[in-house]
Image (spheres, grey):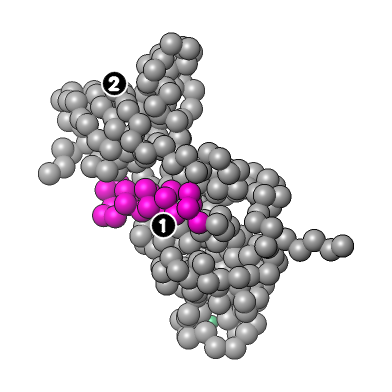
Amino acid sequence: MRGGGGGGVARLERSEAVVLASRDAGEADREVVLLTRAHGKVVAQVRGARRVTSRLAGSLEPLATVDVMLFRGGRRTTVTGAAHAQPFRALRSDLGRFLAANVFAEALDALVPVGDVTDGLYALAVGGLEFLASEADADLALAFVLTKLLALLGYAPTWRTCAACGRPVEGGPYGLSAALGGVVAGPCAQGGAPLSPPALGALALLAEGRPAAVRRLHLAPGVRDEVRRAVWALVGQAAGRPLRSAPVYEAVAGATRPASTVRIDP
Ligand SMILES: [Zn+2]
């Protein structure tokens, strides 16, 4: 089925895709990163996208699904047509959700190599954006979809057994080792950053992959901070670099969290 790296034959392809990122390229063009249903991650040029008359550019905003026509030349792929499929408006009307979706899109871009056609990846990208658009708790929804992404790509975190020695996790203390990909417990705990028992419990529950678990979890603010940072550390480790959008989320989303999680003293 595979064409073996391009082969030099130009062809036109149509695909559904999630727009993960869009950046300037040259004076008038843009470059978009697409996760396509059929061909995995594709980096494509959008000619003239920075001219005010470009209609194409408007259909290629990140965090939406699009129907694209791709022209695959020998070295370069160009977007020749695009139409909105699903814009996920709820992501754009809520800052917390929007920033969470940005972190998810960056994680997809950072973790998925060009051309990777892992089964279920496109469904996870679309399902993840839907989940982030609909869940009340953007923090936990984000930790959940990122954990699913790690698992799908072969970086499933270990929370039930010690990542250093492989023994079942029983007593504390607990630590997080991003390098080893999960919890280090008991005598091994000193090899990681301190991790509280409630945070470990929440991380293990999220890793079971059931969306309902996200709604059942009610975490103290300090614990949810631990959970969020633990997942981000694991994603950063897998990506080989920290996520750029994570500090933005940290700085801004905290102020927009649902009132139920914020205690206001009289
Ligand atoms: Zn151990």
- Answer whether residue 160 is visible to the viewer in this image: yes
Spot occupied by residue 209 in the image (x, y as percentages of width and height): 41, 68
Q: Which residue is drawn at 19% across and 26% down?
A: 12
- Give the structural element (helix, strand or loop) at label 2: strand
Name the residue carrying label 2: 80
Q: What stretch is highlighted in magenta?
A: 114-135
Q: Which of 8 and 42 is in front in this view?
A: 42
Q: Which residue is drawn at 68% across and 69% down?
A: 220
Identify whether 134 is placed above or below 248.
below
Q: Which residue lies furthest to the bottom in this view?
A: 171
Disc 2 residue crowd, few under 14, some 14–19, many 20+, Cα 10 Å: some
Q: Which residue lies furthest to the right in this view?
A: 266
Spot occupied by residue 42 in the image (x, y as percentages of width and height): 33, 36
Looking at the image, is mark 1 or mark 2 earlier in the sequence? 2
Q: Which amino acid does label 1 sit on?
A: Leu
- Give the structural element (helix, strand or loop) at label 1: helix
Spot occupied by residue 51 in the image (x, y as percentages of width and height): 46, 12
In space, the residues marked 1 and 2 are separated at their CA atoms by 30 Å
Q: Magenta-highlighted stretch: main secondary structure?
A: helix
Disc 1 residue crowd, few under 14, some 14–19, many 20+, Cα 10 Å: many
Q: Residue at x 56, y 40 (%)?
A: 93
Name the residue carrying label 1: 149
Q: What residue type is labelled 2?
A: Thr
- Answer whether residue 232 is visible to the viewer in this image: no
Q: Is residue 260 left or right of residue 5?
A: right
Q: Residue at x 48, y 80 (%)?
A: 160
The quadrant the C terminus occupies is: bottom right
